[in-house]
Amino acid sequence: MYRSHTCGELRLANLNQSVTLSGWVQKIRNLGGMTFIDLRDRYGITQLVLDVESRKDLSEEARKLGREYVIQVKGKVEERSNKNGKLPTGDIEILVDEFKLLNPSELPPFTIEDETDGGDELRMKYRYLDLRRNPVRKNLELRHKLGFEVRNYLNQQNFIETETPVLIKSTPEGARDFIVPSRMNQGEFYALPQSPQVFKQLLMVAGFDRYFQIVKCFRDEDLRADRQPEFTQIDCEMAFVEQQDILEVFEGMTKHLFKVTKNVDFDFQFPQMSYEEAMKNYGSDKPDIRFEMKFVEMKDMVANCGFKVFEDAPYVGGICAEGCAGYSRKELDKLTDFVRKPQIGAQGLVYVKYNTDGSFKSSVDKFFDEATFNQWAEAFGAKPGDLILILAGQKSKTQSALCELRLEMGERLGLRDKNKFSPLWVVDFPLLEWDEESNRFHAMHHPFTSPKNEDLALLDTDPAKVRANAYDLVINGVEIGGGSIRIHNDELQHKMFQLLGFTEEEAENQFGFLMNAFKYGAPPHGGVAFGFDRLVSLFAGIDSIRDVIAFPKNNSGRDVMIDSPSPVAESQLDELNIKMKQSKQ
């Protein structure tokens, strides 16, 4: 028996018991006649004591130890004279009788402590060491708990967990596929699934009226903090439902997860906001509603004002930052530099200080009088002491920049508290969006999303105005999940393919199996998919999903620990009939 107890479980109730512990050496302290060792495992840390005077043999062995050596000890539980209130085991220690080295360790490349000296790339290279640290381990324990509770909740709601294929057919819609060559069918390829979308719809046709799966998905796209080439979804589908039925079930799941993992109660129905309202007031389809600071559109207020920047701009809008009129010129210049960053893209920033004495100071003083500034202040709901920040330009681009400015001010003012959670459903998305480059419509969500019944006539007259039966769950400005009611008859699905520019042959080649299935009594159905990695990172209070994945990729899509992706043997390529292009000298 390697251990009778873990390093995190012994307490004063265990006094005088003989125990066996195994784990990793966290620290060694030689203090004259005593040697102290902190022994660590997944469950915690226990202090070991070796009496140098009475057991010199053990002390000599202990002096040879280093950090991360794996050892086994046997001894008696004693009460500590100098208790450590920071440790759950801080009231006791183990007086060691027997000592055994199980495995030595080289000196780790970074300290295995909560506050480590290792950088991101170094810790990813030695991820198996990084996983020994408490913060990383706790994230994965949280992930486990959330996954368990998701299954528990959905099982109680009569969902059936069903696995769908990983080697599927490539489709051109959406992000790039990861392609897998077939050896047995040379010249043909599988794709790794971006989502189990068509299979879960087929399960609804098959009569599995409630499906779910915690599933790996793959997208070959550029990465950022909330993206990985392989990620995990809570994928769900329901038959014989309308939009509100789905929202109620998965709002219930979200409330359940918050209650059991964070003891947070949402004793209200999540608000619903239309896509149009979200874009108008927040410039984003995933608004952070932990704080107000809504946009105020100003174009009508500045018509024929004589200030060319405002007159020439299709859109003029701003926000009111409460209590910020005292910002210095240096602070305002920093804000201007912020909105001019290439990733934000604004040309400049106009400010109006509503001073505490009721006067105004602005970067456009020479163009506007005090009466105009008073009119603006009234429109913004500004009070003395507030700061109005204004951007102008092309509408969608300026709204996006104003959204980033709003979030920046929310951060500066401490309004984005990670311990406060403000969920909402964003609904009534456009069904289609026009792409100038390809000169055709693309599906806002995917080609199987149903239009709203009241907008069906617009498919023939004005497709751009058709709203979708689509919905996203947004919490604290993060899209946690999204879904839609699906098209369930082949006639409407064919019309959708036509609007998206598919020829009959293309539609049949790529989705003929689904269209054929719809001919055999497809029920009304819809679903949702939650980004499991994003959900865990939200609960953990961290921004990057890498920190909640056991073995993540870096920003270049590489696993630096196992050095992947990597070349393969030429013989493997020959089997697949793949010829590599020769690089030009």
Image (cartoon, rainbow, N blue to C red):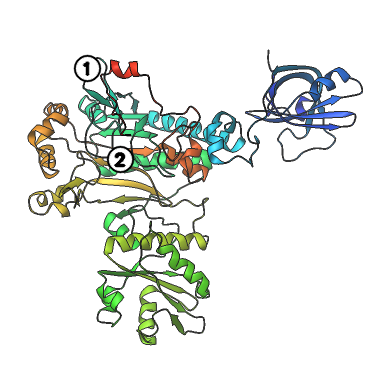
Q: Residue at x 30, y 40 (%)?
A: 246
Furthest toward the top, the residue is 1
- The answer to whether one can see residue 318 in this image is yes
Q: Quadrant of the C terminus?
A: top left
Q: Which mark is residue 185?
A: 1
Amino acid marked by disc 1: Asn
Determine whether, in the image, residue 119 is placed left or right of residue 216: right
Categorize mark 1 by other alpha carbons within 10 Å: few (<14), some (14-19), many (20+).
few
User: Which SS class for mark 2?
Assistant: helix
- Number of numbered labels in the structure image: 2
* In this view, 369 is above or below 35: below
Along the line of sight, which residue is nearer the eye, 443 or 245? 443
Whether residues under marks 1 and 2 lie with C-beta atoms below 8 angstroms apart, the answer is: no
Q: Earlier in the sequence, mark 1 or mark 2?
A: 1
Along the line of sight, which residue is nearer the eye, 293 or 15? 293
Categorize mark 2 by other alpha carbons within 10 Å: few (<14), some (14-19), many (20+).
many
User: Which SS class for mark 1?
Assistant: loop
Tell me residue 335's x, y (percent): 46, 67
Q: Quadrant of residue 526?
A: top left
Tell me residue 548's x, y (percent): 49, 37
* In this view, 429 is above or below 144: below
Determine whether, in the image, residue 53 is placed left or right of residue 261: right
- Write down the residue under mark 2: 246
- The answer to whether one can see residue 322 in this image is no
Along the line of sight, which residue is nearer the eye, 174 or 222? 222
Q: Quadrant of the N terminus?
A: top right
Q: Which mark is residue 403?
A: none
